[in-house]
Amino acid sequence: RLGGMGKTTLAKALYNSICDRFECACFLFNVRKISDQEEGLVRLQETLLSKLLGEGEIKARSAEEG
């Protein structure tokens, strides 16, 4: 057990230790909370694509399309 260390903190630490091994990397916060909201999956996909592609705002019409 890791006293005082949450799952997000652990996930972020792991991400930080390996992200430089990849051409592109992106850490998304609050995935469960956002995905439960209306159009949440679409917003997560848009955020991910925007960050990985280094472009401005990307719009997806549906979760299936994104």
Image: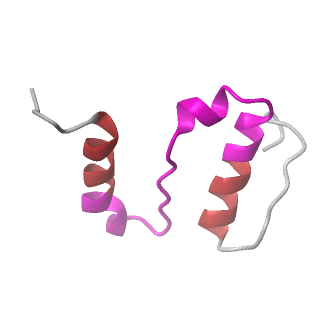
Q: Is 55 part of what is drawn in magenta?
A: no
Location of residue 16 in the rendering, given as x and y in whole percent from the top left corner: 30, 60
Expressed as whole percent of the image width and height from the top left, the position of residue 53 reads 66, 69
Residue 66 picture quarter? top right
Indicate left or right for 40 with 48 as reference.
right
- The image quadrant that residue 57 belongs to is bottom right
Residue nearer the viewer, 64 or 50: 50
Callout count: 0
| Residue drawn 36% across the image and 62% down it | 19
How is this picture coloured? secondary structure
Could you tell me residue 38's position as x and y percent? 79, 30
In magenta segment, residue 28: yes
* Residue 47 horizontal side relative to residue 19, left or right: right
Considering depth in this image, is 1 or 46 the residue closer to the camera? 1
* Left or right: 55, with 62 as reference point: left
Residue at point 80% right, 35% down?
39
Is 58 placed above or below 23 here? above
Task: Tell me what residue is drawn at x 63 percent, y 36 percent.
Answer: 34
Which of 40 and 64 lies nearest the eye of the viewer? 40
* Residue at image coords 26%, 36%: 6
Q: Quadrant of the N terminus?
A: top left
Q: Is residue 8 above or below residue 33?
A: below
- Per the rendered image, the range of residues in magenta is 16-44
Q: Is residue 11 left or right of residue 22?
A: left
Relative to 21, does residue 43 appear above or below in the rendering?
above
- The single residue placed furthest to the right in the displayed view is 61
Which percent across, then down, holds residue 28? 52, 49
**9 w.r.t. 36: above or below:** below
